Image: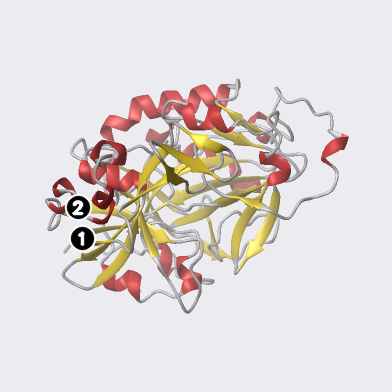
Amino acid sequence: MSEIFTAISELGYASPGTALQVRILRTWTPQVRGHETWFLAVDKYGDAIQILGQRKDQGFVQSALAISKCYTLTKYGCGEPDAYQKWLHNPVYIAVGTASCITSIPDTVTIPTHCGEDIAISLWKECTDAPSKFNRNAIQNAPAPTVIAVTNVRIMDYGGSLRLGTSSATHIYVNPPIKETDTLLDSYKINAASIPLFGLPVPLTEINEKKHSDLLEKTFTTEASIIEYVFSDYWYQVFCPQCKISTLKQGKDWFCPSHGTITSPTPMYKLMATITDPTSSMTVTLSDNASQKIFGTTADKLILEGDPNHRKKLPNIIKETEGITKKMKLRITNTSTERNIRFIITDIEDNSSQSSSITTPPSENTSSSNVPHKTPTCSSAQNQPKVKRALNFENTGMDKSDAGPKRARWSQ
């Protein structure tokens, strides 16, 4: 009989330490707690947990676990992290040491190579209205993949979920000139071809049964059929490229109340869809990115300028995709509430079946996964990378004109 493995979601305080299979994604040693080394691990369901090796066990754990490698863990304990140790929403962490069994296993595509937890960052006008801090065009025109660095953020708790927000001191950098940027971009080039587009699909009925609090800041993979497309007024909308506000038709051009006549607006799909799988159905909003992947083209290519009623009638190329079955990523919308939960498809499987996610760089020491767990190798905490308080290319001088927060929120 095949061995039964515990899932991270099943772990709690005082769990018995039964067999658990994970992939190691990150490692760090806190600057003020040099006796602790932490690891970020994920299981095949995409759930994440922190793993701790400390004090006399620290060197052993550092030698036994390597970034990007997969392991079976047994004989471990589960504790509750304190406020300084807690980096995930998971209420427990795993403690391992010389008494634990850490067995390296062959790499497998069933365990994700990245953690699927998202963190929302609210961009406030005190940042976005300052071109020296926020270059909208640089972000929009940057070729994919792109690395974004956001500094001096506020940390907030919203409904039990972590939220970040910009401050008067925040600067947003596109592909900043630091070694970490090159590491992430190189890792994407190396790993993208071998990484499956999506993880294991979650049944729609399981997603539908979750509470609002369990859906916050989470993205789910599901596999479903698109039964029907729905739109309330028009199947597309046209935005001002400067302020992202919906524009109005004005002769041959478009009009933005804030920026006047727009000769080159930004058309985007404005569609909802009914999706279904063998377990359930739901109505979802389609993001413009997902729509482009389904239809194979941008909205502007399907608009007939000479037919004013065309916007009220779905083009055939859209209707022909009804009935297709795809893997897709969905999450709740930012405006969802406990009484009104709405979902949006943010990404969908295309014909290339390649991932667009930036993944964890492979470990520079690829031999560590072959170290037997009974033969620990000591490693000094002083050799661990230190936490940087500021990016080394930043101008740390404060702009006094930014004093005083504004309450308006910018949204894409």
Amino acid marked by disc 2: Lys
Q: Residue 404: image x %, image y %?
A: 84, 48
- Residue lying furthest front: 251
Q: Is residue 96 at least partly visible in the picture?
A: no
Query: Disc 1 marks which amino acid?
Result: Ala
Residue at image position (35%, 53%) is: 270
Q: Look at mark 2 in the image and give the residue it sits on.
A: 326
Colour logic: secondary structure
Which residue sits at x=37%, y=59%? 344
Q: Which secondary structure, mark 1?
A: strand
Q: Residue at x 42, y 58 (%)?
A: 47
Residue 368 position within the rendered picture, expressed as x and y whole percent measured from the top left? 43, 32
Answer left or right for 138 relative to 11: right
| Residue 202 visible from this viewpoint | yes
Report the Cα–Cα distance between label 1 and label 2: 6 Å
In front of the other: 383 or 230: 230
User: In the figure, is residue 219 to the left or right of 353?
Assistant: right
Q: Residue at x 28, y 63 (%)?
A: 202
Mark 1 and 2 residues: CB-CB less than 8 Å, in contact? yes
Q: Earlier in the sequence, mark 1 or mark 2?
A: 1
Residue 249 position, x and y percent, is 41, 45
In the displayed structure, 84 sits above or below 168; it is: below
Give the crowd class for mark 1: few <14, some 14-19, many >=20 residues within 10 Å. Answer: many
**What secondary structure is marked by label 2?**
strand
Q: Nearer the viewer, residue 401 or 70?
A: 401
Where does residue 54 sit, x and y in percent of width and height?
A: 63, 49
- Vertically, is 301 above or below 309? above
Q: Which residue is mark 1?
A: 224
Which residue appears farthest toward the right when viewing the image? Answer: 400
Q: For this rendering, which residue is in front, 412 or 388? A: 412
